[in-house]
Amino acid sequence: MQATITVLPGDGIGPEVTAIAVALLKDVAALGGHTFIFQEALFGGCAIDAAGDPFPAETRIMCENCDAVLLGAVGGVQWSDPTAKVRPEQGLLRLRQHFGLFANLRPVRAYPMLASHAPLRADLLEGVDMLFIRELTGGAYFGARQEQGDGDTAYDTMIYSVPEVQRVARVAFRAAQGRRKHLTSVDKANVLASSRLWQRTVKQVAAEYPDVQVDHALVDSFAMQLIRTPSRFDVVVTENMFGDILTDEAAVLAGSLGMLPSASLGEGTFGVYEPIHGSAPDIAGKGIANPIGTILSAALLLRHSLTLGDEAAALEGAVQAVLESGARTGDIAEPNTAALGSAAFGEQVRAALRKAH
Ligand code: NAD
């Protein structure tokens, strides 16, 4: 197949980790006889410096004319003034809004060989393999808000419509069909009207997917169950703010922020794929960042935007094989053991991919 991929390396460790994922995507293309065309554009803080805008028109046009976007990370101390008019994260929000990316997928796996890096007992992490689907363009982050007022009062509005819930619920049900056929929908229906609409709508959509078992959990109790018995969850769907909080909670199960990928999807096959970590200014430029989150994001890109499921699985398998071989970047290495730099770790994944072919 032929596909065009826009790469937005961004700031900090973003360029370091995307370079490794791009090398692997080139290998995937060569091994499978595909043609991937890569185009790189400015995004985030570096785009503010170069063009005064974190999401310049030129970048937007490139994203409009491609099949998928691979993003590194944005941000850094030099752009961190919260009162600044133009900030790197505005680029992320505008990118998601522009392409109607309403579903954020975050797979969370606990690798047994990394269990010592997670704060939970190893037996609790056994079999943890879940997929979070967070609604990304609605709820309190997009509802009406009073930001200043008289200084004594402020409000945010958590607002959802039935179509907004239906479309993200369908993404979740379809994902569950391809996995263990179990969906947990998380809300706060005992208190919030928007959650009652959420739950009612998920129940209606469930009728279209009779093969999927659905549970409804209250967000407070779910937050506890996620730590007590994480392996019982398969696909989890929830609204924007609950998802923001719960996915960070779930991230600790994987042992390092550097491990986790994400995909932001809309109605079609187009998507934006990025690791969940930020630009990690404390380690930027040192060549020691863990590239796994970005490599696994490239695998999601292959699966969701290019419908190359076998190639995605091969890439995920190569990461698994390298971890099984004992190779580690600094963030997941045992104390007093040698760690590989990002590039050397990437080379091992490339070798494992070629070996498995
Ligand atoms: P961060 O994720 O950048 O870093 C948190 C900690 O995790 C740091 O100690 C960092 O060194 C470590 N870390 C992160 N990714 C790693 C990797 N791949 N390998 C090894 N260690 C890794 O979060 P932060 O420090 O809160 O934010 C730094 C900047 O990133 C800020 O400007 C923030 O706004 C931005 N940010 C961007 C995104 C994004 O682009 N989507 C997300 C979160 C934060």
Image (cartoon, helix red, strand yellow):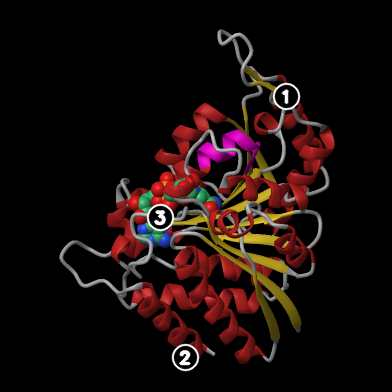
Residue 244 inside the magenta-drawn segment: yes
Q: Report crowding for label 2: few under 14, some 14 to 19, many 20 or more residues within 10 A (C-alpha).
A: few
The mark closer to the camera, 1 or 2, is 1
Q: Does 32 sit above or below residue 48? A: below
Please state, as top left, top right, bottom left or bottom right, where the C terminus lies in the image: bottom right
Q: Is mark 3 on a helix, strand or loop?
A: loop
Q: What stretch is highlighted in magenta?
A: 237-246
- For the residue with label 3, is its CB less than 8 Å from the closest atom of ligand 1? yes
Nearer the observer, 6 or 231: 6
- Disc 3 marks a residue whose amino acid type is Ala
**Which of the 4 image quadrants contains residue 145?**
top right
Residue 189 inside the magenta-drawn segment: no
- Disc 1 marks a residue whose amino acid type is Ala
Q: What element carries label 2?
A: helix
Residue that label 1 marks: 144
Residue that label 2 marks: 355
Asked if the residue under mark 2 is in contact with the one under mark 1, i.e. CB atoms within 8 Å, the reply is: no
Q: Residue 280 carries which label?
A: 3
* Horizontal and vertical percent position of residue 28: 60, 84
Q: Does 225 sit above or below residue 277? A: above
* Horizontal and vertical percent position of residue 274: 57, 60
Residue 180 visible, this angle: yes
- Disc 2 marks a residue whose amino acid type is Lys
